[in-house]
């Protein structure tokens, strides 16, 4: 299993810092330049909201490490948005924007997905209304969707009941935006990224302990914020999953996670790991954008973990790490007790309930406390299907467990990890196999086993481009255009699955489609041929007409057929054999992950669900009205969930695939972005 080699990896940029850089960049006076941002679903949602408020952002949907430029509009010049701002799953985006909007002379509605709409907003709305903003809940009291009307505000000293960085940041942003003095007192110090960034932008922040609380004050709000020029450090919370995996897997050589943000309000897990007996050190210390950074190094050898007691002041500094701590505790000797963590009940899920449920499900004795957990560690093999509860950190914590020796714990809805750690599953797979090549925005500038050799990408120097993505993301149009621009072949893998479905439907066979055997599949004699780069599917020696592949009957059944393992296995070699000639543009759902894992260029297209719905309707010749868009969005989101959560070849972004957000791109711009990428790679190869 190749555990004998030292490994060095990187994790995607810090989510909290990325979100703040986008929002504060939008309030700055001039252009901010941010490198290494997290290109996860949460920051992309915040970016879309800022654009709707008139803030110009360049490069956010672009590939890999491209610099993002934010043209700030100054403190009080955002534009009134035409539609509700959809923050999807992002609590930070919604709450910090509420604060910033309170100072803008306009009205905006903030909304989110079902999970975000279940999270409390009153804690943010209440101080903002005391400052003079108007906040109305449009559906359910205290929850999104929520309308914020901002303007001139009064100064405020706010005593926050919870140690919440989002509440604190919202009030600070309102104060700075409106140019009034604000002070927030919190029971314990929460993460201070906003304070550091405001300082870096020229707003003086005074902080310290006052009457047993932690006080943060902006005594003289500035007239303007300087633009930012910074690199976002790797996310400590993402690194924590990799570190925990290395501790549990017991590698025979050290593993290093490079360039991680080490803000003292975030690294509370490190002393806890030390108490458990894990050897995790920090080397290569530095700073980036006012934040401390360093490399986390997990020593070789399997540590025998001991149970710990964690609570009180320790919790805010490791609030996001409690899920992974719970998993570590499940493999430690003795009973771990976590208290003072009631805040976890109002995160992306009720994390305390989710952790206890999942731990018990795989065979660990776990008790839920009102504000924490009691977990009895065990060395027994663990197995059982666990639920993510649509919470990225729950999914990743159990993903780590699933990748450790002696555990078999498949996780549902793996794609939820995209909000903070794109490429998580691929990285985990590579770590498990002993190498670390791809994974996530910045994962993978690594050691042995890394990408670089093209291996079996294509025969005889054929350059392979893998384009994956969800329905309506613009895949087909773009793939055809890219292939035609470069004179490459186009592989439409969806059409092949459709052809199999059509033949099975027409064969008059009895029995469920799922029970199809390899022999029956061979009998269908499915083949693909090309004329002038255009692919045609052939069955039993005859070309299948294009229209026959796109009937409602085939469309209704194809997902089911595509989920049959025998079908996928049967079509694998056929698809791979397409990689001949100068180049191939392979389009589908698993091109970059399964069919061509060593493709030269991997792109994953995505777009906002409403935009994808609009495109689908247009494709079908329906003029997209609001009600139809809503219904189609719901259908698409349901299908995405199914495609992403199926255990057989789920729709997942390969760790080393570049995410291209096509929401605001037309087909020509999408094609251009990919062609440029291919030319760069081709240039590098020749
Ligand atoms: O891209 P399309 O709509 O023509 O795809 C048809 C179906 O086939 C769709 O439900 C997803 C499935 N499919 C798949 O599972 N794997 C692929 N590589 C391509 C398509």
Image (cartoon, helix red, strand yellow):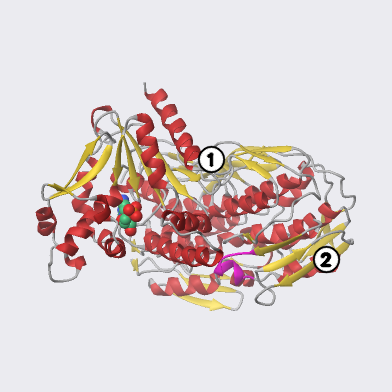
Label 1 crowding class (10 Å Cα cut-off): few <14, some 14-19, many 20+?
some
Q: Quadrant of residue 579?
A: top left
* Residue 13 in the image, given as x and y percentages of width and height: 57, 45
In the image, residue 142 lies in the stretch drawn in magenta? no
Q: Residue 158 carries which label?
A: 2
Closer to the chain start, of discs 2 and 1, is: 1
Q: At numbered mark 2, what does the secondary structure look like: helix, strand or loop?
A: strand
Using residue 361 as the reference point, say whether residue 24 is left or right of it: right
Label 1 CB, ligand 1: below 8 Å?
A: no
Q: In which quarter of the image is residue 160?
A: bottom right
When the figure is inspected, residue 531 is found, relative to residue 84, above or below; the finding is above
Pick out the residue farthest to the top: 686
Q: What stretch is highlighted in magenta?
A: 111-119
Label 2 crowding class (10 Å Cα cut-off): few <14, some 14-19, many 20+?
many
Question: Which numbered disc, 2 or 1, marks the residue closer to the eye?
Answer: 1
Q: At numbered mark 1, what does the secondary structure look like: helix, strand or loop?
A: loop
Q: How many marks?
A: 2
Distance between the alpha carbons at the discs numbered 2 and 1: 39 Å
* Residue 561 in the image, given as x and y percentages of width and height: 25, 61
* Residue 353 in the image, given as x and y percentages of width and height: 52, 75
Quadrant containing ligand 1 = bottom left
Using residue 558 as the reference point, say whether residue 316 is left or right of it: right
At x 72%, y 39%, the residue is 228
Residue 331 seen = no
Considering depth in this image, is 145 or 405 the residue closer to the camera?
145
* Residue 399 in the image, given as x and y percentages of width and height: 42, 59
Q: Which residue is identified by label 1?
A: 62
Considering depth in this image, is 343 or 657 the residue closer to the camera?
657
Residue 569 seen = yes
Using residue 514 as the reference point, say whether residue 24 is left or right of it: right
């Amino acid at each position: 299993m190749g555990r004998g080699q030292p490994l060095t990896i990187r994790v995607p940029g810090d989510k909290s810092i990325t979100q703040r850089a986008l929002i504060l960049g939008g309030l700055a006076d001039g252009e901010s330049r941010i490198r290494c941002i997290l290109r996860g679903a949460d920051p992309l949602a915040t970016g879309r909201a800022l654009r709707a408020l008139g803030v110009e952002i360049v490069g956010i949907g672009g590939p890999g490490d491209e610099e993002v430029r934010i043209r700030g509009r100054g403190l009080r010049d955002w534009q009134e948005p035409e539609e509700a701002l959809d923050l999807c799953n992002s609590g930070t985006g919604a709450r910090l924007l509420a604060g910033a909007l309170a100072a803008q002379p306009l009205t905006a509605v903030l909304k989110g997905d079902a999970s975000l709409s279940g999270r409390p907003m009153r804690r943010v709305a209440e101080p903002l209304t005391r400052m003079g903003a108007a906040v109305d809940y449009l559906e359910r009291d205290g929850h999104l969707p929520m309308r914020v009307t901002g303007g001139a505000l009064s100064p405020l000293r706010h005593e926050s009941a919870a140690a919440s960085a989002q509440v604190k940041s919202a009030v600070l942003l309102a104060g700075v935006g409106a140019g009034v003095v604000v002070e927030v007192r919190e029971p314990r110090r929460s993460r201070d990224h906003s304070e550091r960034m405001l300082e870096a932008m020229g707003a003086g922040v005074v902080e310290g302990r006052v009457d047993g609380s932690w006080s943060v004050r902006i005594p003289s709000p500035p007239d303007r914020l300087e633009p930012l020029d910074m690199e976002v450090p790797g996310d400590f919370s993402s690194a924590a999953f990799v570190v925990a995996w290395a501790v549990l897997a017991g590698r025979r050589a050290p593993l290093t996670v490079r360039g991680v943000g080490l803000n003292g309000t975030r690294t509370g897990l490190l002393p806890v790991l030390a108490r458990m007996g894990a050897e995790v050190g920090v080397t290569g210390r530095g700073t980036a954008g006012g934040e401390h950074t360093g490399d986390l190094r997990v020593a070789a050898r399997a540590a025998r973990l001991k149970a710990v007691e964690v609570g009180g002041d320790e919790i805010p500094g490791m609030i996001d790490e409690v899920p992974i701590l719970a998993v570590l505790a499940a493999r430690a000797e003795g009973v771990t007790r976590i208290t003072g963590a009631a805040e976890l009940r109002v995160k992306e899920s009720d994390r305390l309930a989710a952790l206890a449920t999942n731990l018990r499900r795989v065979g660990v004795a776990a008790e839920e406390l009102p504000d924490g957990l009691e977990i009895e560690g065990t060395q027994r093999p663990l197995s059982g299907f666990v639920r993510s509860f649509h919470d990225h950190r729950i999914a990743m914590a159990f993903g780590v467990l699933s990748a450790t020796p002696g555990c078999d714990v498949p996780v549902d809805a793996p794609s939820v990890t995209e909000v903070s750690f794109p490429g998580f599953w691929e990285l985990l797979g590579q770590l498990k196999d002993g190498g670390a090549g791809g994974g996530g925005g910045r994962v993978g500038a690594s050691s042995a086993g890394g990408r670089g050799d093209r291996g079996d990408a294509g025969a005889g120097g054929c350059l392979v481009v893998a384009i994956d993505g969800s329905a309506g993301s613009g895949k087909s149009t773009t793939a055809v255009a890219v292939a035609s621009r470069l004179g490459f072949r186009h592989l439409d893998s969806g059409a092949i699955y459709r052809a199999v479905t059509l033949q099975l439907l027409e064969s008059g066979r009895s029995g469920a489609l799922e029970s199809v055997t390899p022999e029956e599949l061979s009998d269908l004699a499915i083949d693909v041929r090309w004329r002038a780069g255009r692919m045609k599917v052939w069955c039993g020696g005859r070309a299948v007409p294009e229209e026959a592949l796109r009937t409602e009957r085939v469309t209704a059944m194809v997902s089911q057929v595509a989920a049959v393992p025998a079908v996928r296995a049967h079509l694998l070699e056929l698809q791979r054999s397409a990689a001949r000639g100068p180049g191939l543009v392979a389009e589908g759902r698993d091109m970059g992950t399964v069919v061509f894992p060593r493709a030269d260029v991997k792109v994953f297209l995505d777009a906002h669900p409403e935009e994808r719905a609009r495109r689908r309707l247009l494709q079908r010749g329906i003029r997209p009205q609001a009600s139809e868009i809503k219904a189609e969005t719901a259908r698409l989101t349901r299908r995405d969930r199914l495609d992403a959560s199926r255990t057989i070849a789920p729709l997942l972004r390969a760790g080393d695939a570049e995410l291209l957000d096509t929401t605001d791109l037309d087909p020509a711009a999408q094609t251009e972005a990919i062609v440029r990428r291919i030319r760069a790679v081709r240039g590098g190869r020749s």
